[in-house]
Amino acid sequence: MPSSKAGAATEPFITLSISHRVGQLHLEVAFELSHRWTILFGPSGSGKTTILRVLSGLVAPESGRIVAQDGGQRTLLLDTSRGTNIPAHLRRTPLAPQAPSLFPHLTVRENLEFGSGAHPDPEMLETFELTRLLNQLPRQISGGEAQRVNLARAAACMNPRLLLLDEPFTGLDLPLRSSLVDNMLAWQQRTGVPILSVTHDVAEAFQIGAEVIRLADGSVAAQGAAAEILSDERDLLLRQLESPCRGSSLAKG
Amino acid sequence: MDVQALWLTLKLALGTTAILLAVALPLAWWIASGNGLGRAMVQAGVALPLVLPPTVLGYYLLVLLGPLTAPGRLLIRMLGHPLAFSFTGLLAGSVLYSMPFAVQPLVAGFRAVPVNLLETASTLGSSPFRIFRMIALPMAAPSLVSACILAFTHTVGEFGVVLMLGGNIPGATRTLSIVLYDQVQDFNYSAANRTAAVLLVFSVLALVPLYVRRNANTRSLLA
C-alpha cells in the first residue's frame, strides 16, 4: 500500500502492460503505479479511458498482464498468456465514469450504498457535501451534485484496491472543480486508497500535485511529477493567461 | 354461463403466465445481453408462434407428444398417460404459443437499460445476478407488467392450439373460446353472445392498464 505522505512513492502496487487495438488506435502501454494519486494525461482519443476500462475489467485487451501488489499479497488480475482475467466485480477497482451513471430508480443514499452494502460513512457524506441530498432521486439533483455522488459512490465501495476516475472534473465550473478536488484529496488522506484518474486538463494535474503518466500515440511518452512532465503545457497556459491580446481575442471570439 | 370453462380458462392463463415468467426472464436477459447468430436463432424460434398458424403449432405438438415419437413415448411412460388431451398438455402448448408475447417486451425492456449502468454496477463489486436483480429488473419493470398482461390475455384468447392439442374435455381442456365455438355450432346465439361478451370485456379490461401506464410515461417525458 502507498505511504501516508501525499504523493510519496512506494513499492509499485499495480504493474500493467497491455496491447490492444481500438478503432484506429493501437495501444501499446506499460507502466507501474506507485503514487497515491496518478494522472493519465493525454489528448482525446489517446486511449486513456480504454486503459481505465482494461484496469477495471470491463474490457479484455488483446494481450497483456496486470499484477496487483497488496501488502505482501500478489494478485494476478489479468494475464492473457495464461487465460487469467478476474471479472470486474471481483477486482475491487471501482470506476467513476465520465458521465455520472447514477442508478435512476435508486435514491442518492441507495446509490452510495450500492457498492458497500453499508450505510454511508457520515464523514464521507460531509466531505462530499451530500448529507442533504440523501433522499433525493438522481433526476432531482443538479449535474454538479450528480458528479459528487458519482465520485463518492465509487469511493464508498467496499475495500477498494484502486479508485479509477474518468475525467472526474471535466465540464464543471472552476470553483466546483476546486472544491471537488479538495474533497477527493481529503477523502484520500483519511482512507489511503490510491487513485488513478484521467484528464486532459493541465491546471487539474497541477492542483492535485499528482504523478503524471503522459500518453501519446497509444503509448507512454513520459512518467513523473506534474511539474516536470507538463512544464511545456504549463508555460503555454501561463502565456495564454498573461497575454492581454490573446485574452481579448478570446473574449471577442 | 359456463363457470367451469371460465375457471379453467383463468387457471390455464395464470399457470401459463407464471411458467412464462420463470422461463422468459432469464431467456430475455440472455438474449438482451449480447449479439450473434445463436441469440438471433433463439429469438427467431421464440417469435415463430407470431406467424405460425396456431393449428400448425397444435398439430406438431400433438404428434410430438403422442406415441408416434420417441419423446412422446418417453413422456407417456413417465406420466402413465399421453400429455395431449390433458390440462398439462394444454399448459405446455400455451407456454410455447404465448412465449413471444412474454419474451419480446422483456428483451426490449432489458435492451433499454443503459450499458454504462450495468458496467458501473459491476466495477462497484456487483455479481451478474445482483446486477440483474437490483438494476436490470427494476428498470425493466414496466416491460415486465406488459409481458404479464400480454401473456395472460393471449392465453385467454387462444383457440387453435387448444382445439388441436386439448380437444374439448369439460373441466380439463374445454376453455371459454372452445365453449363459444360449440355454442355457435349449436345455433345457441344467446349463450354465444354472453360468452363472447365476457371474453371481450375481459380483454379490454386487461389492456387498459397497459396503455394507461404507457401514456403516463410518455406524458412525464414531455413534461
Image: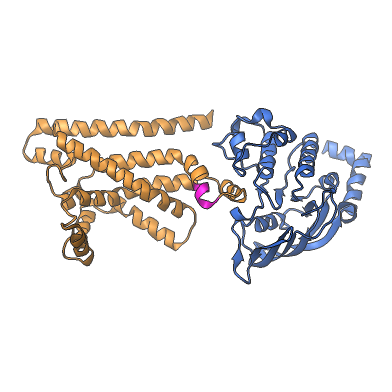
Chain colours: A blue, B orange
Quadrant of residue A126 in the image?
A: top right
The residue under the point 49% across, 53% down is: B33
Q: How many labels does the image show?
A: 0
Q: Is residue B71 visible?
A: yes
Residue A177 point in image, percent of width and height = 78, 38
Residue B143 as seen in the image, left or right of residue B154: right
Residue B53 as seen in the image, left or right of residue A53: left
Q: Residue furthest left?
A: B186
Q: What stretch is highlighted in magenta?
A: B127-132
Q: Residue furthest front?
A: A72
The residue under the point 43% across, 31% down is: B215
Quadrant of residue A76 in the image?
A: bottom right
Q: Can residue B157 be seen in this view?
A: no
Residue B127 point in image, percent of width and height = 54, 51
Residue B140 included in the magenta stretch of the image: no
The residue under the point 31% across, 33% down is: B206
Secondary structure mostly seen in the magenta stretch: helix
**What quarter of the picture does the N terminus of chain B occupy?**
top left
Residue A124 to residue B50: above or below: above
Residue A204 to residue B219: above or below: below
Residue A88 as seen in the image, left or right of residue B195: right
Q: Which residue lies furthest to the bottom in this view?
A: A81
Residue B71 point in image, percent of width and height = 23, 64
**What quarter of the picture does the C terminus of chain B occupy?**
top right
Residue A225 point in image, percent of width and height = 87, 54
